[in-house]
Amino acid sequence: MDYLERYEFWCGNAPLSGKEREALLAMKADDDEVKGAFGAELQFGTAGIRGIMGLGTNRLNEYTVRRTAQGLAAWLSATALPQKCAIGYDSRHNSRLYAEICAAALAERGIHVYVYHELAPTPMLSYAVRQLQCGCGIVVSASHNAGAYNGIKCYGPDGCQMTDEPAAIVFREISAIPYFVPTKQSFDELLEAKSVEFITPELWERYYQTVLHERVATVPSDNLNLLYTPLCGTGNKPVREVLGRIGVNVDVVKVQEQPDGDFKTCEYPNPETDAALNESYKIAVQTHPDLILGTDPDCDRVAVAVPEDGSFRKLSGNELGCLLLDYILGELSAQGKLPPSPVAVRSIVSTPLADKVAAKYGVKMKSVLTGFKYIGGEILALEEKGEEDRFVFGFEESCGYLKGTYARDKDAVVASMLTCDLAAKLKREGMNLAQKMDALYAELGYHEAKVISIELKGPNAMELSAKFMADFRAAIPTELCGIPVTSCTDYQSRITRNMLTGEESAVLLPKSNVVTLVLGEKGSVIVRPSGTEPKVKLYLTAVDRDKDRARALLADLAAAMNAYVPK
């Protein structure tokens, strides 16, 4: 079907309410709107599905959500995995509704479903999958996207986001399912029949105890004054509970304390952006906290800012990752608790400064593809050998961190605890996080980094993304800013080419639509499309022993790469 045929099919067959039918018929007057809503079907991948909420095959609604859950149920039913599923959801509009739709779709297939009785962070769902020995899990969330979005993230039995092979099977199952198969029983009826049950408060407490077990501090952090924002999301309860137990004095940004799917005071609730903390900055000018900390709506990412020279310095995801890595390894080493042959893991787009931090402590740093499921995969590989205790820390530059193996996704709760413990320790020593970061730079070299996100608009945005990558591959530069490109790695073809000698070697990581250019010891450029949004991302790193030279090179790299941006 083309988009008009899909639209007409929905007009004739969708069991819509009167209000929904009016909206669908009104759409006909705007061809671009029809094309945006029906020009494609939401694609299921390792990150599940994510999209703007609304009517249409390319939108998230009760019909696309139910079809997705039915596809997941069909996959699970055909496996030998436990026929159980855990479901969590965040504070977005319709998240609870979509969670109930998913629960009913799974229970109809004879799968026992556990649902959080209230909104809960994504890492708590990963934890629940493992604790309840489920065959799969679902989180209803669009993470840090704007309020118009929502999504269905699916997890495997190890508590890790679904990998390529099962995701492909689920996608095939979804494609074979009609859109408007009526429900057999309501969520409430299934709850009464005990096919669906709420996750007990006891699991929340076990989660808190597990997170607290990951502390490396040996004293309370009751000297730290923190200003915290959950950005209207799921972090408010668990983050404040854990920080309260370690003694942190927490003040919360009131206008962002309660769940709000509109995110009225934070249009784009992404902790990677400085604007996400704007409301916090307004309060901090008056209250003078030691640290500002924010978690995204599903509480798997965390960002911090430090008062500095009358203003605030927000640390990047890379910087906080390096600080936490240095803190964890330093404390474990000092306490004689660093495990034999320890392993840390980072994504390929995260800073190579982390490699130097790990090397200080004799720790092996592994680089994996972007997506925390690949970090989870490294933990699973260790677990299968009975060596999961070797894992000490994993992080992505996009503000995602994990210490411990209790979950297989990034966890802003444990990261918030570790960050506050580190900040409290530094305060006792007369320092703050920014000063400690500068000391790391002075010791190991300045690694200035920048991410350029190229947003592609229109119904053919994903095709534009593919074209951008194809055009870039067709004209790989041999130098940037007068610096030779020493190697090019194409993770799609899984080949690294020495640009100076022409020698080629195999890449052992899985295939991925990513290209990396290395500029010797001076930095790198990484190009990849976003897995969840119509964007292409450019990750730039400039390295120098001198801060000003590193920053100048980063600016030059940004200018050079902007030439590739479609005008």
Image (spheres, helix red, strand yellow):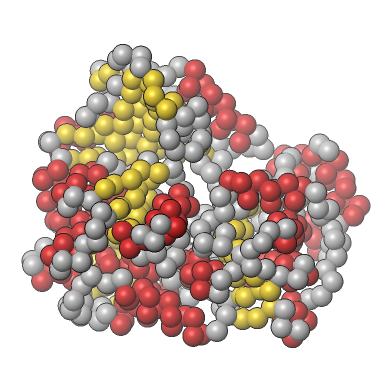
Instruction: Determine whether 450 is above or below 297 in the image.
Output: above
What residue do we see at 22% from left, 29% from top? Answer: 522
Nearer to us in this view, 20 or 49: 49
494 horizontally vs 553: left or right:
right
Task: Give the percent coordinates (x, y) of residue 93.
Answer: 61, 66
Up-down relation of residue 131 to residue 149 (above or below): below
Which residue, as the protein is rendered here, is positioned at the far top?
Answer: 501
Please tell me which residue lies in front, 395 or 425: 395
Q: Residue at x 24, y 61 (%)?
A: 339
Task: Pick out the residue farthest to the right.
Answer: 12
Say if 392 sits above or below 335 in the image. Answer: above
For residue 74, what is the image quadrant?
Answer: bottom right
Res. 157 in view: yes
Residue 312 visible, this orientation: no
> Which residue is pictured at 57% across the width and 76% down the height?
116
Nearer the observer, 11 or 328:
328
Q: In this view, does 159 lie above or below 453?
A: below
